[in-house]
Amino acid sequence: MIVRSNHPQNADLPRYHSKREKKPFPIPIVELRRAARERLKNAKKLPRKPTPPPRNGMLVQSLIPVAYEVMNARILLTNNLKRLMKVIPVLACKYCNEIHVGATGHPFKTCRGLRADHRKGLHEWITATVEDVLTPIETYHLSDRLGKRISHEERFSIPRIPAVVELCVQAGVDLPDFPTKRRRKPVIRLGRSDIIDANEDDLPDPRPSKFKKPILDEVPDCEIVPPANAEETASLSEATLEAWETLQQGAAKLMRKYPVRVCGYCPEVHVGPSGHKAQNCGAYKHQQRNGQHGWQSATLDDLIPPRYVWHVPETALELQRDLRNFYGQAPAVVELCVQGGAAVPECYKPTMRLDVGIPTNLREAEMVV
């Protein structure tokens, strides 16, 4: 019998990048230049094609339902996490951004926070919140996606909203609190960055969109009701994991059409064709760049940070410091749902190292080849 799988048996986590080095490009510069030369070479042989959406100011109609699904999945995920964290303890370090799912924090000396040398790298654990599990990444809201770039003087006058919400708004979600310009005719391009809007006076009055769906409401913390028993916790964990996968897959689909930028030096994210001009980057050697961001294409982890935590095996209640190399890791949402009773998705099994045997003591670990 031959067992085939699209995922490796064991895989390492993404490499940790120091704050003093720039993030690597998702696609190397050499590959981008080669693809650009190939496009120019092929474009000379063919007639010029009209600019497709969303570059022409129109919406991609097939992605509007996806945007509503992502919007509701984000709210449902937040509400379910608040309920799960009432019965499954989640801890956060007081001095750094590391978290742990379990009643007792892990003993690994990996703290890089304030005065970590005085504590010899040990963490000081406190109760975590939903913001520790789902890192809030905010960005500027654009009233016109193809308008002028945000200047440094406008950085305080433009509202900031969650980056996922801004991505959904640009993809077709209508929010009364955050209006944005919707065009019904493609824009007229006079140059690379000079555009004018087409005349829409001859069009009839706009009709309500057939893709519009009701948006869920976020439940306040004072109204959160924890699950009553283990069966309800397991079903809630399955629903939470399904909402997490819907959020991840839907956001990845939207990012293929609607560009998202991230600073190569800091976590700043901008949803739009080009980054803003606000000089608020405080990363390493920002004085040499006058506080300007180094914009590059963003990945899904930049938009929705997974927040990897140590996976606690079912056979062990606590992690042992000497057996660190045998433990795996998983995103905090996945680990929280797995401890609540949900099945482990196939794509997370390689990093969780579920098939790795864990020694019972240090002497047995030293005998492992």
Image (tube, rainbow, N blue to C red):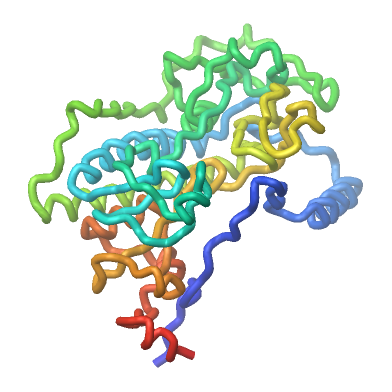
Q: For residue 106, which quarter of the picture? A: bottom left
In the displayed structure, does residue 7 sit left or right of residue 289?
A: left
Q: Is residue 181 above or below residue 250?
A: above
Percent position of residue 160, x then y = 53, 21
Q: For residue 47, which quarter of the picture? A: top right
Q: Is residue 359 above or below residue 74?
A: below
Percent position of residue 180, x then y = 54, 17
Q: Is residue 359 above or below residue 25?
A: below
- Give the residue at the far left of this rendering: 228
The image quadrant where one finds the N terminus is bottom left
The residue located at (41%, 59%) in the rendering is 330
The residue located at (68%, 52%) in the rendering is 26
The residue located at (34%, 38%) in the rendering is 130
The residue located at (36%, 39%) in the rendering is 73
Q: How many marks?
A: 0
In the displayed structure, does residue 91 sit left or right of residue 70?
A: left
Percent position of residue 166, x then y = 52, 28
The front one of 323 and 192 is 323
The front one of 115 and 54 is 115
In the displayed structure, does residue 16 sit left or right of residue 136?
A: right
- Give the residue at the far front of this rendering: 118
Percent position of residue 240, x then y = 29, 48
The front one of 270 and 50 is 270
In the displayed structure, does residue 234 sit left or right of residue 184?
A: left
Q: For residue 75, which quarter of the picture? A: top left
- Give the residue at the far top of this rendering: 201
